[in-house]
Image: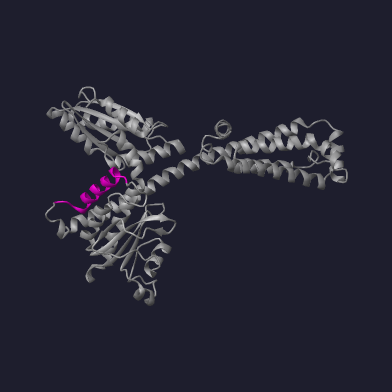
Amino acid sequence: MAVFWRDLSRRVLPPSKAGVTPAWAWSLAALEAIFLCALAFGLSCWIAPQDPLGLGAQFPWLWIVPALLAMRYGTAIGVTAVVTFIALCLLLPELAAYLPWSRSIVASATSLAGQEFPKAFFLGGLVLTLICGQFSDIWSARTRRLRAVNAYLDERLNTLTKNHFLLRLSHERLEQDLLAKPLTLRETLARLRELTASQQAADPVELPGAREFIQLLGQSCQLEIAALHGVTGTDRYAGMPTAVLGEPGVLDQDDPLVRYCIAQGRLAHVQTTDITPADRSASRYLICAPLLPSGSAPVGLLVVEKLPFFALNDDALQLLSVLIGYYADGVRLGHAVRAVLATVPDCPADMALDLMRLQRIRVEAGIETSLVALVFGKDEESLDRFEQVKRLKRGVDLSWELAGNSHVALITLLPLASAAAVDGYLLRIESALQQQFGGGFVSSQITTHTARLGHADAGETLLGLVRRCAV
């Protein structure tokens, strides 16, 4: 039965609403339409029993109800309201037989029985309702598309903001404990993100890559005694830590700093002005921070019991907050990234993550996303063209380089790009090659392949494109 109603909703409801709004919501909307139409019809019978449909009135007031319902819910609910009016008009004599004590119902039934069925009246009302419903469907679809695009752009902006902050820090300082390893903080976080994407904890309470992550926190923020705790329920965390630095004790969830951190959903420390002096002195922790992904519930909790006095400063707290946000996002989206990496193991984690985000937007909002692959030879001229194409990549695009024995390929993910946008991208690349090297794709022996994300698995789509490149 559930499958029947799902298929019926896909056929009857607008494409932008079917599959997004649950079936029970549409059932409530239909019941609301029937109730409001019955209420309006009954009120009309009570006010004007000799003309319940308002055929002699200067304005057909009854059609305001279907028009408003169509504007709010769309064409399907509007048509339901019209059908309800027709059914009430036809069944009114039967209702009058069961309600002889209601003078208005009896008078209205007598009035309708003495005249011909008003076909033009209902046809005009149906046309008005269809116009309002079509207007609602079109603008609802546009609104959903804009919301999906804005949600994706907000995620990208949040990621770019964190990247900008980490890039500034990586140019300003290198951590003393990482001098033996020539890695910047950005490169270290990239490895940590790959770790959370490739590892999967056997227990939901456990956190993937927790030991490596807390070691990174200790090196970057000078933590001495700290612990990571997984989530066991709503606002509840495991007493035993998943990963530790030093020898911390069992988590005290009644600690004032822990309670404040959980209630506010943000990092808290002993210098937080909103915490009373009594609570500061009663807390055994110096820092508490939830592992909170963007737009989701916490996946863990970090508590710090000991760190150097001068390490508790604004820069260290800001760095700690950014590192925690990166790790939490990786944990939340790790299962989605792993689904792509299981099909295409060599795919970069960033591209796998965006593939899953854009796949969801394609299914829910119908906004297309495209993949473009350019295959080059390995001679010197072809490699020069390859490097030039790499430099032409837009900031919003993600690329993946593949190298084989005789060819190299560059796969570029074009977010929210339709077929026309792909044509424009290829035309821009070919024009740049023509200006610098005097030849386009054909004369330069550059092979192009394209693919679009659809309802099929995103990993399979990417794998098919890789196979077509034959690198």
Q: Is residue 127 left or right of residue 356?
A: right
> Is residue 424 visible to us here?
no
Looking at the rendering, the stretch of residues picked out in magenta corresponds to 182-200
Instruction: Look at the picture and state if 283 lies above or below 101.
Output: below
Q: Residue at x 28, y 64 (%)?
A: 248
Q: How is the image coloured?
A: one colour
Q: Residue at x 69, y 43 (%)?
A: 65
Q: Position of residue 326 (x, y in %)?
A: 30, 52
Q: Is residue 133 left or right of residue 383?
A: right
Residue extending furthest toward the bottom: 278
Q: Position of residue 103 (x, y in %)?
A: 87, 45
> Is residue 100 visible to us here?
yes
Q: Position of residue 244 (x, y in %)?
A: 26, 59
Considering the image in quadrants, where does the N terminus appear? top right
Q: Position of residue 10 (x, y in %)?
A: 54, 32
Asked if the magenta segment contains residue 198, the reply would be yes
Residue nearest the observer in this picture, 90 or 275: 275
Give residue 173's quadrant in the image: bottom left
Considering the image in quadrants, where does the C terminus appear? top left
Asked if the magenta segment contains residue 36, the reply would be no
Residue nearest the observer in this picture, 240 or 396: 240
Q: Is residue 355 left or right of residue 121?
A: left
Give residue 67's quadrant in the image: top right
What predominant SS class does the magenta segment belong to?
A: helix
Q: Residue at x 76, y 43 (%)?
A: 41
How many numbered discs, if any?
Answer: 0
